[in-house]
Image (cartoon, grey):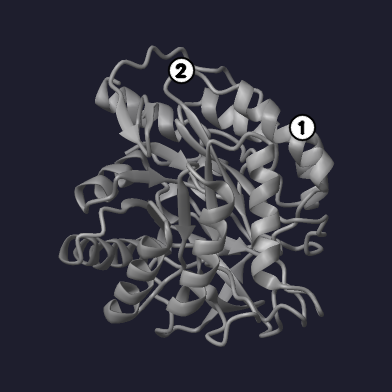
Amino acid sequence: MGNSFANEPIYDMGKSYEENAEKGPFFDGEIPKREPSATSDFLGFQVASRLGVPAGPLLNSNWVILAAKLGFDIVTYKTIRSRTHPAHPLPNMVYIDSKTPLYAGVAPEVIVESKNRPDNMAHLAATNSFGIPSKDPAFLMQDIARANRAMGAGQVMIVSIVGTPREGEDFVQDFVLAARIAKEAGAKIIEADFSCPNVASKEGSIHLDPQAVSIITKAIAQEIGEIPLVIKLGVVREKERLRQVMEAGARAGARAVCGINTVSKEVVKADGTAALGPTRLRAGVCGGPIRAQALQFLKDAVAVNREQKLDLTLMLTGGAVLPEHFDLFFEAGADVAMSAIGMMFDPYLATKYHRNHHA
């Protein structure tokens, strides 16, 4: 099937996040020629395709611009905060050797890292443990504007935001402040990241708490006005909980839902010690093994969207590492199909899809 690694990843796992941001993306291949024709509506924007990159891999405007040139037409500027925030130290990504699907809250809960890259793209899996680093607002204002200016015809960029819980400060208002930065920088679409573990919610993660989703979504929507708002959800294992969360978001002003993030597992070395160090026993796993979990999330989200008549746009990410995986996402009901680690390790992933579909 031609699934072997034809290119080196554009993110260097051996370098720090800061080095990757400053010197990457590491790509010296040809930019394919493309004449996009078909267009689709995405939250009021005409896009040449419904392929995207979710929040995370596109560290700054240089990364956003490359992804867009390589055929991803809905690109997400990595999650920003209201203030500078450091990345976790190395290691951030280690390979995972798992050729069977991984589900949240289902055995195996302990995964052993692999010292070697998997033998082909179909088996690609790794940890994602960066800590949502962010540059200062002055940098973000200029860099987001630069990325927006570089979007081609039929392309649009989303800016992802997150609130930061700080002692003595209003967590909801910090979300609003991050949204204000994105808005003033010229964001066309804003995504609120509710998918990461967060001490501000009694559930541990905002996306599991319908009340928190409602309060924060409403506050952001009031701040950004007509700018479309996406809410990013992690895995929600119970369909009833997902219904409550999606209804809360829709009623409060969200126009789209993006899921999933990663699947949290304890990741260890061969000797049983924590692969990412003693302070990070668990990590989010991304890549091929979580695709089944993503598709299950989508199945439930499609049903809730239809049954409750929410009219939400559904964006799916999680485990798309081959071009045909985008088709699986679309066939299952996704309005937008996205890839993170797949794009990082095969920058021509979207190009291959477009060629297969003559776009």
248 relative position to 160: left or right: left
Say which amino acid is labelled 2: Ala
Q: Nearer the viewer, residue 28 or 5?
A: 28
Marks 2, 1: nearer the viewer: 1
Let me know if residue 101 appears in the view.
no
Where's the N terminus, which quadrant?
top left
Q: Which residue is mark 2?
A: 153
Number of numbered discs overlaid on the protein picture: 2
Q: Is residue 9 above or below residue 153?
A: below
Quadrant (top left/top right/bottom left/bottom right) for the C terminus: top left
Measured as percent of width and height from the top left, residue 330 is found at: 25, 45
306 and 86: which is toward the camera: 306
Q: Quadrant of residue 128?
A: bottom right
Q: Residue at x 72, y 56 (%)?
A: 81
Q: Is residue 337 left or right of residue 287?
A: left
Q: Residue at x 44, y 35 (%)?
A: 349
Q: Secondary structure at mark 2?
A: loop
The Cα atoms of the two marked residues, 2 and 1, are separated by 21 Å
Residue 132 falls in which quadrant of the image? bottom right
- The residue pinned by badge 1 equals 142
Q: Secondary structure at mark 1?
A: helix
Residue in view at x 74 percent, y 33 percent:
143
Task: Name which residue type carries label 1.
Answer: Gln
